[in-house]
Image (cartoon, rainbow, N blue to C red):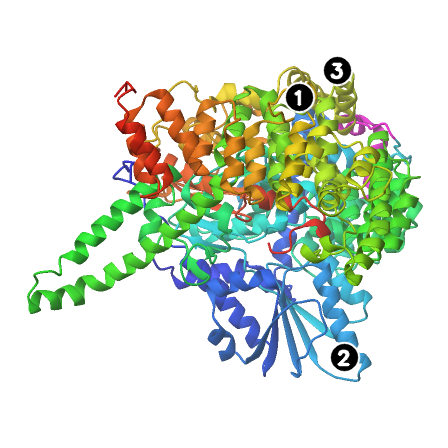
Amino acid sequence: MMKTRTDEEDYWNSSKYKAFTFDDEDDELSRLQESKRAVNSIRGLVDDEDNDEDDMERVSWSGEPVGSISWSVKETAASNQRTDRDPTPFPRISTDVANVSRGHSGYSLSSLFKGKMKGGNFQSFTDSLTDSSVRLYAPELRKPKSEYKDLVSDWSPEETVHRMQQGKVVSLEKFRSLHDKLLLLDFSVSAHDGNVITAILIYLKRTLSKEVLFRELESRQTALRHFIHYLTETRDQKLLLDLLRSLGRTEDTVLLQYKEHLNISDANKRRDFLKSCVSLPFSADDLAHVQDHFTLLDRQIIMEATDGQNEREGKVEIFQKFPRKAPIHNMPLIPTLHYSCLYHYSEAQETFSSPLSLRHTFKISEKQFFVTALAARVKLKAWSDVDALFRSRNWLGFTRKKAPLGFHRVVDVLHKNAAPTQVLQEYVALVDDADLRISLAHKHKCHDIVINTYRDLKDRQLLLGYREKVESGSAAQKKIDELLENPQIRWKN
Amino acid sequence: MAHSARRDSPKLPDFSLLKRLAKDQLVYLLEQLPGKKDLFIEADLMSPLDRIANVSTLKQHEVDKLYKVEYKPIVSTSDQLCFLIRPRIKTVKWICDVANADKAAGRFRRYKIIFTPQKFYACESVLEEQGLFGDVTTDEWSFYLLPLDDDIISMELPEFFRDNFLAGDQRWVRTAGSTLHLLHSIYGPFSKIYGIGRCSKMVYESWREQVEEEETKARQAEIGNVFLIDRDVDFVTPLCSQVVYEGLVDDIFKIKCGCVGFGTDATSDKNVKVMLNSQDKVFNEIRNEHFSNVFGFLSQKARNLQTAYDKRRGMDIKQMKTFVSEELKGLKQEHRLLSLHISASETIMKKKTKQDFQEMLKTEHSLLEGFEIRECISFIEEHIIRLVSMIESLRLLCLLSITENGLLPKDYRSLKALFLQSYGVEHLLTFANLKQLGLLVEQQPGETLTAMESKVGKLVNDKTAGKLTDAFSSLAKKSNFRALSRKLNLVPKSDEEYNLRVPRDMAYIFSGAYIPLSCKLIEQVLERGGWTGLEEVTRLLNGHEFSVTGNNGADLRANNDAPRIVVVMFLGGCTFSEISALRFLGKEKGYKFIVVTTAITNSSRLLEALLENHMRPVNT
């Protein structure tokens, strides 16, 4: 369906595209609407002055502490307009969202009125309303609109924020007192517009000492998060670290410092940096990880020096047979173990590069070691090593193979490393669960296992079905045919 | 195919208008810059731009050469450079480098940045700092909404998720409000708006203020209801493996802006780019189907096609002529589409069997059900040890944590250690991010809860704190996913057979194992016309629900579909599985859902967004 032309014009008129023509013709209108909004909030306040608790509760955030400011700077005359002509059919929602965000950011407004810093304890808005000091200060702020509205730069903090939201030109330079600056910030937070919040933070960063700014941000979580994000994006690492430290956020501080290693590409420099990280106040668990990170890279640098040389000189056969893809710097631990199992499998534990040494240094679990070594040795088709891995768990002298994880997983590892069918078959047969065994046998074409299982089930139908799936003329097919003709078997179907 | 649609299903509004508006505005902006110019386009704007304009549109407006923004020195010889970018500090810094390099070389050019969908002060302040404010001029292209299909509209802002939920940066709140405002001014007025989540509330407020700033005229409404939902209300759903066709295709081939590149293994020849939408008749019939039905459907189709082709035999010349002119083209088209989807399905089958998909699904279902958790943990453990896939490991860990309301401290420690050993210690940063978002946390013993409470208490005033404390103390005893799941019946009893061919509820999108929480909430709220009766549920979701009715003189009389048209706006992304579930719900209840989302997401996009830059896979 087609839209009428007027609809389209509606869109263009309402869209932001108007903003960059710097056309301020609508100021009259927006001013009117601002006053309306102000009035909207005043009504609650006026009611409150009359009395009762319930009404106070109704004045939950949604602009009300803000409203108290606008109350002081706006004319009250327009108070009747709202009900007459309300362009917003939808109600404001009483947002405990705002309550929460107000909780960290806003209550300082009232404390500012009383001329003291709020520190850790907060004061509920209800308190601030009943506090007479509010009434003491507020009237001073009240000026007739006409007195200052002539100058474009004479917007109140709230109006300024509002204009910024609409993408209009504003000047922040006139907000010089801390009080005004914080009003700007708090209004922007209550407008939920991150773009404006950040803009004001940029201004505050420029015009306030960092001690003062940090102190004020501590009680304004929403603004604080914006500031942290802004500093992260502009890569102002130094200021960000200062901020986190001054907030006592140790965990964030150390992680941010640790993160810096990702920007260091030279392996030796990165190792040195990681070494310095070990002395940072990490939690005990994380410290162990960071220590491992350093030890591993240190180890890798040593291994790389020898292996790289051996590879270049072509003296060691294994590097010729299986050329390395890349230097091992910055590989995680398990891939490094895998590497070590490929190139240094038989070395003694005393050698830095041996799998046993890695296992010992980094306390690698049996399961991790087994899976990794298995994958590496299968990849090299070193079947005796593979057998030995299973045998080594077999110290009681039984012939049965054992593994620290299910044999279906073993089969999976074998398969992923391109083990041939006869090897797979051997391990598929060891899978305990009968259903799983047969489905793996199907998947990996271990014909003997499938055929024997069906024979044991005396299921002629399934066997006939499987005959269709194997290659005609193959040994498997012959075996099926023999079984089917065998008069000794009493088929169940 | 299996679902029986209600016959009186309402018609969808025409969203192609949105594309035209965006295109017209772009043209206008280009005309503001007369003369030949080179245009640099940000990489992730290329596909959206493709959907609304083409090269010749740009050429007609004197765009000479087109470049992709690559953060490298440029080679252009043009005297006018125009940059079409997202408002990102990094990109603006690069443009400043370009301009300053020109300055140093004594070269004079004109520079124009067009930010879309809007500009940010932080970006302009970069221009100011670099001494280029004024030399580089800026504009805004209010390209808020890209219709991807008849019922899907995307803001194409994947960074919304990380910015809003991880960083706590509200820069996109107004953008989302403006988006809603745009829909409202074209297709509104809305009569009812529901929502849940902190961000949803803020977006609603922002929208309401924007409406307040202008005159509204009574119009015939085309969209009656709006439902806003924050992504963090439901993280379980996007973390589950997708098993409906469209979702599965997205998980495996990555659908980008409605378009997918079926890699070399999907089709016999080479990499083919295909648009996936309702225009593709074959796709349209299978997109919402559980994957187990797709093969059967495709082979049935193939047989029908064969029969249709076979009609040729025994035709005389005249019949043959009609056949060729009337049917052949359609048949060929269908043939092409069929073979495309058949080979895509083959690839899916191959990939999924390789990954022990069945076992993975079993683990997910156990987690959703809260059954055999120990087995699940050891599955995840082995998954990590075997280095299967970093993102999949992370996905399972998060799913475990959310469904169990956190991991036991000893499990958390050992799984984290395994993970770091397998995928790198730098993922300490990933774990910190996941913890911050509440996606992967340690279960808190009793006394830590009070610490939590006091933290919350500090943030809110007494009354709300009291409410929250109640919520927390009840959450501490039982996991809230389990409680929600019980309250809303999200996990059907497993002993009943679930017929995936004839689904009985939205659970079919997860093989009958789980009804997506997000969609269930939407269903319940629409059914009740609000949140009444769902108090317990919203308490478990930490509140922030709302339901407002507009009194706006919308013309709702006579034969209007608007009340049954529901816009669902996902803030932080939605998955194709959720879209399928809503389509099913719409058919069942006679609604039409229009999904508006900040971006299409899935488990890997969601989790990759939480990795630090250096650790993200290169080719996403």
Q: Is residue B53 magenta?
A: no
Q: How many marks?
A: 3
The picture quadrant where one finds residue B321 is bottom left
Closest to the observer, B32 or A130? B32
B362 horizontally vs B38: left or right: left
Report whether residue B590 is seen: no
User: Quadrant of the image for the C terminus of chain B?
Assistant: bottom right
Task: Name the residue that disc number 2 marks.
Answer: B102
Q: What whole-number distance in Å separates the C-alpha atoms at marks 3 and 2?
A: 63 Å
Q: Which residue is mark 3?
A: B446
Label 3 or label 2, whichever comes before in sequence order: 2
The disc labelled 2 sits on which kind of residue? Asp
Q: Residue at (80%, 29%) from the top-left corner?
A: A128
Q: Chain of mark 3?
A: B
Residue type at mark 3 is Gly
Q: On residue A54, which mark appears?
A: 1
Relative to B136, A173 lies left or right? right
Which residue is more in the foreground, B205 or A52? B205
Residue contact at pointers 1 and 3, CB within 8 angstroms: no
Secondary structure beneath disc 1?
Answer: helix
Figure check: A464 above or below B424: above
**Image x and y of residue A98, in percent:** 68, 35
Question: Dividing the picture into quarters, in which one does residue A40 lie?
Answer: top right
Report the Cα–Cα distance between label 2 and label 1.
Answer: 65 Å
Task: Say which chain tag 1 marks.
Answer: A
Q: Nearer the viewer, mark 2 or mark 1?
A: 2
Q: How far across and how far down the image is residue B549, in percent?
A: 48, 35
Q: Which residues are magenta?
A: A120-142
Q: Rate crowding at label 2 as few (under 14), some (14 to 19) or many (20 or more) other CA atoms within 10 Å.
A: few
